[in-house]
Image (cartoon, rainbow, N blue to C red):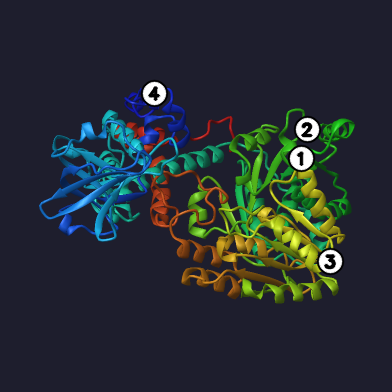
Amino acid sequence: MRPEILFPYYAPVTSLKGVGPKLAPALSAHVGEHVRDLAFFLPSGLIKRPLLTLAEARIGEIQTVRVRIGGYPPSPDKAPQRIDVFDETGRLQLVYFHRIRGFEAQHPVGAERLISGRIEKFGQHLQMSHPDYIVDEARAEEIPACEPIYPATLDLSSRMIRKFIQTALTTLPDLPEWQDKAILDKYIWPTFNQALKAAHIPQSELDFSPDSKTRQRLAYDEALAHQLALKSRKLHRQNTPARVVDFHRLSDRALAALPFALTGAQVRALQDIRADLRSGHRMNRLVQGDVGAGKTLVALLAMIDLAEGGFQSVLMAPTEILARQHYEKSLPILNDIGITSIIMTGRDKGRLREEKRAVVASGEAMIVFGTHAVFQEGVDFQSLQLAVIDEQHRFGVGQRQRLFSKGDSVHYLSMSATPIPRTLALTQYGEADLSILDEKPAGRQPIHTAVLPRQRLPDVIARLRSAIESGSQAYWICPLVEDTAESDLIAVELRHRELAEDLGMEIGLVHGRMPSEEKDAVISRFAAGDIRILCATTVVEVGIDVPTASIIIIEQAERFGLAQLHQLRGRVGRGRDKSACILLYDTPLSKNAQARLELLRDTEDGFKIAEMDWKLRGEGDILGAKQSGFPDYHFVDPVAHTGLIAMAARDAVYILQHMESLPEMRRRAIDVLRQLFDWRAETPDKQD
């Protein structure tokens, strides 16, 4: 049960004064349903409102002035309302573009007022349009000298959010100290309560730095709570008995028949997996590898080991195209050693679907490839012992658990082609063991990468025409689906039409708004060679394997993340032909964007690119936090706080190992920490 001291944190936002039935839905949608969500909603910026005289006014800046109302110049009904104000050093005119009823009665001529807003110069006169504040001296405290700014919506202004947050903070009790005193003394950190309140009253831009004492303390607490949950799950798994699997005859036979040898990294990853399978405990391992590093083959060999022991395996992919590619590449190997496999997707209907389910339930199909269809109700395995999930972050925790529930103590192997710096991967996937494939199989063609301004577009199209006439296939990648007045990003539908006209041939079109079956049909025609050019958005970023495609052109490349560009580039270089990636950019190009594109031009090492991407882009959605599987942190900046995450991971292990010997008060405080952030360890019957 949640500790009683946390009840105020998890009170609904409707318990706060001023949050009525009209505002509550908007506040819940934007910030969260609980008081805790408000307290954890940090400001994104700061407005300073220095008190100045009109003679000291800083043009174009926000400031506060103490003035008297001088008069209300007459103006037509539909004209802006103007109010003359003055102090002993000068005059200023307030402008409201819509008239405010009763304004003159509230602020009569001669009244002294504090006014705050941005002062501009109109001709020779000072002017302030729509002041942020206009109050009498008795309410002077309503104008903050330093005002935190919160992300707002049409229904919720920053000031409204600030008011609710300040109210929320007054309802929250001080929490017991869960951190070791030595850590607090070493880093000179405030208490959690002090840090949380200080985060909402920043005094300068330095207070927004992830290296400030306030932000460090909050980030470390959140990271520690997260790591405690991850490490608890790992301990749970290590204490969960599982079947011992130690069979390699068939997989060794499959390896011997391959026309190439495994890379050293593949050998090490396979050894890691086999050690897990014979340990007698449930495996949870992440195989992380760059584009084309051979992750699927390693997973297939593990599934063959299971099949030799009489156990079933399933490989689940996020799209039907990717699932089918895994199946079709694996089928010749499995047929050669006599292992039955099938593919299950949402496209299976009626009798075909029932026949496939029967084959799985009987145990005849030892290896099942598929999409979400594999964990649906009615799909029953006879002896499921290994679940392989490709790009696990594209599936929810509940979906993965439904798959694991199809067997008893199912071993878990996940694969990811999204490069994440090793230190981050080790701490982010704290409940999993990690194997990294950092070598490419022999024979992979290097990809020549060129960086060109978009003014060279006619030359690029001419070279593309020549390459297509010589038998090549190409991808053309654009950022958006359709052109809009608000955006200058190239629209894929517009570019599709223009390419078809310029080249006089059928061009394939694929984007995220198309129905899956229509999208898959176009990609299948491209893979079969019926279509020579595929114009697409980033839906082809992961998992599309067309060895005959040797050219990829990416427009407005400076708008993409480095890791995303690297993934897109990985769509070519998969066959025997020399491959090229052309990155088109808009001018002028910033120094940062130029450095990023030059790095991509100079290296194909995904992990090196990922490291640089984090460094160059700094705070924000570096790799696409959600895309990379990162949790929705409130305080942790995965880039700036890498060291804190690693420290939290080590401390979490120590705490869990010594929990019984810790003083009771600290044990209770640690429980408060875990439940405050709601990073809960999974219960024994759950396997994720």
Q: Which of marks 2 and 4 is nearer the N terminus?
A: 4
Q: How far apart are marks 2 and 1 (CA)?
A: 8 Å
Q: Residues within 10 Å of mark 3 (few under 14, many from 20)?
A: few
In the picture of the structure, the residue carrying the numbered disc 2 is 382
Q: Earlier in the sequence, mark 1 or mark 3?
A: 1
Foreground tag (2 vs 3):
3
- Give residue 312's mark: 1
Q: Distance between the residues labelled 2 and 4?
A: 54 Å
Task: Give, as a three-letter code, the residue at label 2.
Answer: Gln
Q: Which of marks 2 and 3 is nearer the N terminus?
A: 2
Q: Quadrant of the N terminus?
A: top left
Foreground tag (1 vs 4):
4
In the picture of the structure, the residue carrying the numbered disc 4 is 20
Q: Which of marks 2 and 1 is nearer the N terminus?
A: 1
Residue 574: image location, x then y, percent = 75, 66
Q: How crowded is mark 2: few (under 14 residues within 10 Å), some or many (20 or more)?
A: some
Q: Which residue is drawn at 49% across and 42% down?
A: 230
Residue 371: quarter of image: top right
Secondary element at image label 1: strand
Q: Which of 33 and 135 is in front in this view?
A: 135
Is residue 443 among the parts visible in the rendering?
A: yes
User: Looking at the image, do the residues carrying marks 2 and 1 touch, with CB atoms under 8 Å apart?
Assistant: yes
Task: Give, as a three-letter code, the residue at label 4.
Answer: Gly
Tell how many labels.
Answer: 4
Task: Give, as a three-letter code, the residue at label 1.
Answer: Gln
Q: How far apart are marks 4 and 3 (CA)?
A: 61 Å
Residue 494: quarter of image: bottom right
Q: Which of 184 and 61 is in front in this view?
A: 61
In the picture of the structure, the residue carrying the numbered disc 3 is 504
Foreground tag (1 vs 3):
3
Residue 453, compared with residue 214, is above or below; it is below
